[in-house]
Image (cartoon, helix red, strand yellow):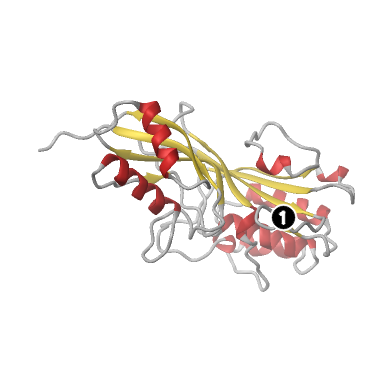
């Protein structure tokens, strides 16, 4: 039996606008595919990697972890520098960490947090980073009321896309909140769940926009975008708060449902038992 290679963890971020999601797919450019190719070029051996999640097409990640095995890395800082040189500008490596054999960036994670950004004033330069909703009157009180229901839901069959990858649709939502952001800089700022922005009760017409944050032990396929899209339907009066509550309670599908566009969605934080995915 061949000895096991050294396990490594990469902490990275990426702007997902031009990629068909994280996971390698045939005939599509994905973040994982680009990174694997860069690793093969530098290390000169086949690479089998795994990420902490599987973001959809066009979705971004402010914080992401992946692991792979190799005995060809001797100088970590030099390797990180060379890897960043090879990777395109929309993928950034922040750390390369030597890990223990059983470290698994996907299955060791205890929670993941996503942010979704919406801006109210039309700006041709923001369309790749946030969702514009300035022309549509929205009842934010109803959206907040429906969002609070998410904390009581266990089965998210109503709020995800069908997938054969998951044996159960049970998720444990720890946090779901809307707040006000006053500038575009807040979109790009690293995620701090405990550093909350003003609540929607302070929302003014001149404000830049809003942020939805949600934290769970796991997420299903298309779940966050479906939640945001459905909540916007509630805010526009297409679905009542009571209908939202009854539908998710019965694991039924909504008569009107929308998956929010991907450009406003960011995987923002991945947590592990000891703070880093090094077991």
Residue at x-position 36% and y-position 32%: 79
Instruction: Pick whichever, 203 or 98, lies toward us.
Output: 98
Residue at x-position 81% and y-position 54%: 140
Q: Please say if 91 is above or below 237.
A: above
The quadrant of the image that shows the N terminus is: top left
Q: Please say if 193 is above or below 145.
A: above
Residue at x-position 77% and y-position 69%: 238
Residue 155 occupies quadrant = bottom right
Q: Residue furthest right?
A: 205
Q: Pointer 1: what residue?
A: 125
Crowd rating for badge 1 (residues with CA inside 10 Å; few <14, some 14–19, many 20+):
few
Say what secondary structure mark 1 lies in.
loop
Q: Determine if residue 102 is in view.
A: no
Task: Give percent across and percent down for residue 254.
Answer: 64, 69
Q: Please say if 17 is above or below 197.
A: below
Residue 229 occupies quadrant = bottom right
Instruction: Pick whichever, 92 or 231, lies toward us.
Output: 92
Task: Give percent across and percent down for residue 92.
Answer: 50, 40
Task: Give percent across and percent down for residue 208.
Answer: 81, 48
The quadrant of the image that shows the C terminus is: top left
Residue at x-position 20% and y-position 35%: 4
Instruction: Pick whichever, 176 or 25, lies toward us.
Output: 25
Q: Determine if residue 1 is in view.
A: yes
Task: Give percent across and percent down for residue 134.
Answer: 82, 60
Q: Residue furthest bottom?
A: 255
């Amino acid at each position: 039996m061949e000895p096991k290679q050294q396990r490594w963890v990469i902490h990275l971020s990426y702007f997902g606008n031009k990629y068909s999601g994280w996971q390698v797919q045939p005939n599509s450019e994905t973040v994982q595919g680009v990174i694997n190719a860069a690793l093969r070029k530098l290390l000169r051996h086949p690479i089998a990697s795994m990420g902490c999640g599987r973001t959809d097409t066009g979705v971004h990640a402010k914080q992401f972890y992946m692991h792979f095995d190799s005995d060809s890395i001797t100088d970590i800082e030099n390797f990180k520098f060379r890897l960043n040189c090879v990777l395109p500008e929309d993928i950034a490596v922040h750390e390369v960490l030597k890990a223990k054999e059983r470290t698994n960036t996907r299955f060791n994670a205890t929670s993941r947090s996503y942010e979704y950004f919406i801006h109210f004033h039309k700006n041709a330069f923001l369309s790749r980073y946030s969702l514009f909703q300035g022309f549509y009157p929205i009842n934010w009180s109803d959206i907040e009321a429906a969002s609070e229901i998410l904390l009581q839901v266990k089965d998210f069959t109503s709020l995800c896309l069908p997938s054969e990858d998951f044996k159960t649709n049970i998720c444990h939502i720890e946090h779901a909140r809307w707040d006000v952001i006053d500038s575009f800089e807040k979109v790009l700022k690293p995620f701090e769940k405990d550093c909350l922005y003003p609540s929607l009760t302070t929302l003014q017409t001149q404000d830049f926009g809003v942020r939805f944050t949600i934290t769970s032990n796991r997420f299903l396929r298309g779940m966050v975008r479906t939640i945001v899209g459905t909540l916007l339907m509630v805010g526009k009066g297409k679905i009542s708060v009571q209908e939202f509550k009854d539908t998710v309670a019965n694991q039924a599908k909504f008569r009107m449902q929308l998956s929010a566009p991907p450009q406003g969605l960011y995987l923002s934080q991945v947590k592990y038992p000891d703070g880093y995915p090094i077991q």
